[in-house]
Image (spheres, grey):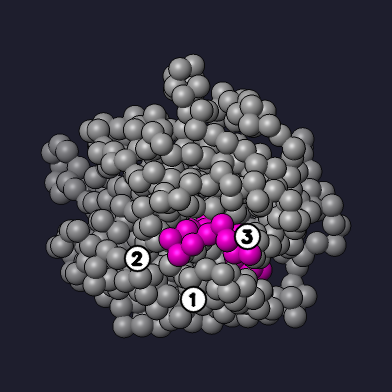
Amino acid sequence: MVSRVIPVDTFDLVIFGGTGDLARRKILPGLYRRYLAGQMNADSRIIGAARAKNTVEQFRDLIHAALVEFVPKDRQEPADMAAFLAHLDYVAIDAKEESGWTNLKAILRPNVVRAFYFSVAPALFGDLAERLHAHHITDAGSRIVLEKPFGRDLISARALNATLSKYFSEAQIYRIDHYLGKETVQNLMAVRFANILFEPIWKAQYIDHVQITVAETMGVEGRGAYYDKSGAMRDMVQNHMMQLLCLIAMEPPYHFDPDAVRDEKVKVIRALQPITSAEIVRGQYLAGKDDGGYIEHSQDPNSKTESYIALKVEIANWRWKGTPFYLRTGKKLRARYSEIAITFKEPPHSIFDDANGWKPNVLVIRLQPNEGMNLMVMIKEPGPGGMRLMQVPLDMTFADALGADADDVPDAYERLIMDVIRGNQTLFMRGDEVEAAWAWTDPIIQGWEARGDRPQGYDAGSSGPEDALMLLHRDGRRWREIKE
């Protein structure tokens, strides 16, 4: 199945931090793929902006090397790459200085979409916003794109929102969370709201519990000092996992409209109940045979920062009262594996013998690897010998079900950048949403800091700390296995 590709309007996209790692690994390769797909207008331009005194040719050479490294080999036709690179320009600029801004203003064109991607440290967001405004580079139709973190607590998030709102309206600010750009995450909304099958039973009366898992095999090597200032709660739960929870739990919006969707997400966050220390498990991975542990990678022998966290979360509203949401995420786990699993309750009455192998229905949404969904249902085991039940999946792996080559499916950054150009904020976080998430998260972090809690050690390559198992065992449930 070939997806429809609709070209976007002509744009000038300025990437601050255009020579940085994110630009090289994700942003520019993603734009190249959109160019190949025919979605990037022939007159559009991509302008790198960074402190390095590069020429345009040097910047193009840098991005050419990035395309060779990060784009599949079968997409590296020299003519295509040369044509794409011809759309690139470059300006040497410093976010904290005045040099370069006049040059940037001079090369931007009127009457095209102007977007500015802040692929820089969050400490520079305010400086960039201020100088774009002071040099009259932006107008009412301009857009800015921000990477997380959006603050590190409620106070800093409010301060950042206040700074940005001096120069830009909320309709111009695109806070990017790449999890929301994943095909499977968006399909979660389609499954819920485009089919009458699920929505009538999408509530506590029929759903036993929900598990959200984001497991990584990598540690924090090379960025331990940075990560040690955040930890799994700030790095993953407050944004990525909170977004996944909201999409599962939110009420149907009146329309698939940016503010309508985000209104419902904010309601979920504000309905989250405070959690106790008994509903939190934190961990740090230990050293393995051939590698150091979190303590070595963070370079702080006294670090109390978590590389793993598991939480039991409840939502205080009519739809979800009594249905727990279990969240877990961690580094150095058994597999790179992300999924949402909705486990349904048992039928109110079984006509079959209890010993005949009944298992609950589970809707599994796989985010990585092998994006897709499957619904575990009970059927009769083939053959004679009576009514023996077995569980089988109704599988919808996207590559199989839709006949899609993995290289043809836009990745999250591709989709989200095109949404910026279109002016569609549905998959981006709103300022009050960010603040609501921090308002719930802050007391949890402050609680373990006040108690002086230390994370529990866990073996690299395991499924996490032992205490995380008890988080579910106390409720008579089990975590799903972390596996490829």
User: Along the line of sight, which residue is nearer the eye, 230 or 21?
Assistant: 21
Label 1 packing within 10 angstroms: few (<14), some (14-19), many (20+): some
Let me know if residue 219 appears in the view. no
The residue stretch that appears in magenta: 132-152
Q: Quadrant of residue 465?
A: bottom right
Q: The residue tagged with tag 2: helix, strand or loop?
A: helix
Q: Residue at x 49, y 62 (%)?
A: 139
Residue 65 shown in magenta: no
Residue type (three-letter) at the residue carrying disc 2: Pro
Nearer to us: label 3 or label 2: 3
Badge 3 marks a residue whose secondary structure is loop
Q: Main secondary structure of the magenta part?
A: loop
Residue 335 location (% of width, % of height): 55, 42
Amino acid type of disc 1?
A: Asp
Q: Is residue 324 visible?
A: yes
Residue carrying label 2:
258
Query: Which one is earlier in the sequence, the residue at label 3 or at label 2?
Result: 3
Task: Provide the residue designation for mark 3.
Answer: 135
- The Cα–Cα distance between marks 3 and 2, rounded to whole angstroms, is 30 Å
User: At numbered mark 1, what does the secondary structure look like: helix, strand or loop?
Assistant: helix
The residue pinned by badge 1 equals 432
Single out the mark in the foreground, 1 or 3: 3
Name the residue: 68% across, 32% down. Answer: 55
Q: Nearer the viewer, residue 467 or 447?
A: 447
